[in-house]
Amino acid sequence: MNRQLQFIIGGVIIAAILGTVIYQTTESTVFFYTPNEILAAPASFEGKEIRIGGRVVPESAQWNPAKVQLSFRVTENGRTFIPVVFQGAKPDMFREGQGVVVEGRMESGGVFRASNLLVKHSEEYKIDPSKVKDREAAYRTLIK
Amino acid sequence: MLPNIGFIFLTAALAVSIYGMIAPHLGVVRNNWNLVRSAQYATILNFVLVIGASAVLWQAFVSDNFSVRFVWENSSTDLPLLYKITGFWGGMDGSLLFWELVLAGFSTVVAYAYQRGHREILPYVILTLNAIHVFLLFLLVTWSNPFDTIFPIPLEGRGLNPLLQHPAMAMHPPLLYLGYIGFSIPFAFAIASLIRGRLDNAWVVSTRRWTLGAWYALTVGQMLGGQWAYEELGWGGYWGWDPVENASLMPWLTGTAFLHSVILQEKRNMMKVWNMVLIIVTFGLSILGTFIVRSGVLNSVHAFAQSEVGPAFLVFLTFAMVVSFFLLFKRIRLLESRHTADTLLSRESAFLLNNLFLIGIAFTVFLGTVFPLVAEAIRGTKLSIQAPFFNAITAPLGIALLFLMGIGTLLAWRHSSWEYLVRNFRAPVALALLTAAVLFALGVRHVWALTVFGGAVFTAWIVFADFYKSARVVGRQQQIGWLEAIPATLARNRQRWGGSLIHLGMVFLIVGLTGNWFNAEKNLTLSKNQPVDVLGYQLVFKESRQEQKANATLHMAVIEVYRDGSLVETLRPAKSFYPTQPDPLTEVDIYRTVGEDLYLVLVSENPDGTVTLRVLVNPLVMMAWFAFPLFTLGVMLAIFYRPRRLESTVAAARLGVAGGGG
């Protein structure tokens, strides 16, 4: 009797955990796309929470300190791009021409509104100091 | 020259551990104890050789010997001495050597401390530990050689990643390794018991201290990791369900479950198979954790090293799991438990539920960590699992565990009566409801948070009342007041009260985590000397300043913080420039109070003389740190507890009474 009850309680708890896990797997999963995949069918991505991974188009970044807003374009092939507006602080390692992952939603105007910005630093993100003469000055040019 | 000696030490150590893996088995088969003894010597010799190798590596770090690739990668001349020393585990090769060093030390202790009373299984404990040595040393002399040299010799090193130049980060990796390695001792005992078919409770009882110590190291290691992330990464939190964080959380969860369920085996002779499963899984998860951290398979801020070592770990993990479960399967008939939980309303049930909840969380974390990996491997889709996935399970089960800590304290072994429970639950339940009601009246509307705060008071009250009652009984026996009787009470059942202290720490930790539901954040741009009200504080930007700090140049904004019209603190959030790094690093500054943290991040210094800040208010963070001293005291108390062997229960009980007065 008691043993049965134990198994029933245990079973219900396990079922509840599994149920929640399965439900959340569909609910909290964010898929990752490249700009070209999105540009092939922009309308189908509207309003969905997604991640886009691409490179920042050189000379496309604008940092607006007053609004704390960073806008730039991400590209895969260097020709077509998606405009991104990121509401938040500019990461230290953000630079044009570099790989980024943005997370957010496509808006109807074709602008990607990002709530999260991850900067992909390359494997060798440490520079070789022996090649730089005036280090401090070199670093300054990097941050603007 | 010297680096080559380090490599020779490692090669010799590998040979010695291969011997240490074979000799104990031969000794047992041929009934030649001298062979077993020679394996004990091999363990010491291995330890000495690995100490030698480590000394060589440390010497290379301290003397800036950049002909060693690993030193070149992780150090530079401008680095403070502390970080030259801790640069040892700043990368993978050194981490593995550090792991081997600690394991070799532990193995030596085990080989000699358990000579008496463990003659039958000790040879196989040594064998199992040496198998792990062989794996690590093999990696160290092949793909992961820390003594690999480069030519021409660079004049300057590449520097330790400045993110890692933080006191908490100096301690975080070694503590995690201590935890992982600590769990490999009960694992080795479990495997040895399975091999020998000696399946009494000896392996559980005699490795209890290792389990506790490992649990403590893993706990503190993770707390320091959280503190490091909070102070150094500058995104405003301490836990992000990052794969690497999950990697260390999983063995912690199964290890915590193990820590509890071995008590059932020790006291009630239950859960014998389950405990085997738990320790095997915990060991496996430690290896998996290292695989995740070091292989770079998951996109993560931590995944800095990609190498052939990843697959090697996966092969070893598979091998260890297959062998362990095969042994377990072979011996499963010997592991039948004679007892089960007698009734639903018993402490046994509380332990079973504890295990169910912890494993539920561990399973969820495992799935959330591994699923993206599997999905990419099989379907080619890249996806990421978000925090809500983890929170959906962790929050309710965490809250259930919070209440369970209180309820379990009140339940008796075997059977509790409803009347007793109702009588004892009345006060804590009333207090919990009162707490929730008061907080509700004060404006807290978050239902889950109210449940946590109520539960915290509920459990804390029960734990205190439980101790108070015992202290009063002891006081009455010795005719002293209950306050004076505290030391005697503690001495009587160190394991129990150690556990209570840890549970109390857990209450604080959970309350601290709850603060995350109330975090507030705002980005704003400040002009000089113009006060701005934000999130209950008034901030005034006074000036920008540059300062030299150790090997870094800091560009800081000086911000005065006012609360209710008076100056409470001057904060200096900054960006720091390291000589060997291309990018500046964010240096946050925090004004901490018991209630909440004001957390400032310098986003940018703008050309027009203004500064842009991210302002975060994180409530209750300090509460989580309060857990640390309680964990420490609790573990220290419990570790000095000597578990009585089941066969000498009577003698131990007599000793317990005699020792009770002191």
Image (cartoon, rainbow, N blue to C red):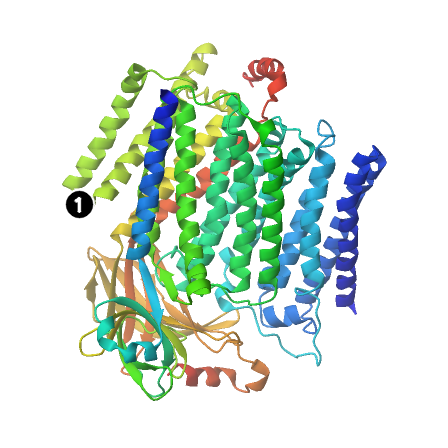
Picture layout, residue A127 above or below residue B71: below
Number of labels in the image equals 1
Q: Which residue is drawn at 24% across and 59% down?
A: B562
| Residue in the foreground of this view, choosing between B605 and A114 | A114
Q: Is residue B212 visible?
A: no
**Drawn side of residue B635 relative to residue B427, left or right:** right
**Depicted A37 relative to depicted B356: above or below:** below
**Of the pair A12 and B231, the residue shown nearer to us:** A12
On screen, residue B334 versus residue B409, left or right, reads right
Looking at the rendered structure, the secondary structure element under dot 1 is loop
Residue B509, percent across and down? 38, 43
On screen, residue B72 versus residue B35, left or right, reads: left
Q: Residues within 10 Å of mark 1 (few under 14, many from 20)?
A: few
The amino acid beneath tag 1 is Arg
Quadrant of the frame with the N terminus of chain B: bottom right
| Residue drawn at (49%, 32%) of the image | B261
Task: From this view, report whether residue B576 is shown above or below residue B291.
Answer: below
- Residue B570 appears at what percent x and percent y? 32, 62
The answer to whether residue B645 shows anywhere in this view is yes
| Relative depth, front residue between B357 and B538 | B357
Q: Nearer the viewer, residue B211 or B282?
A: B282
Residue holding disc 1: B445
Q: Quadrant of the C terminus of chain B?
A: top right
Q: Position of residue B558 (x, y in %)?
A: 33, 69
Q: Which chain carries label 1?
A: B
B201 displayed left or right of B55:
left
Which quadrant would residue B569 be assigned to in this image?
Answer: bottom left
Residue B197, image x, y percentages: 66, 30
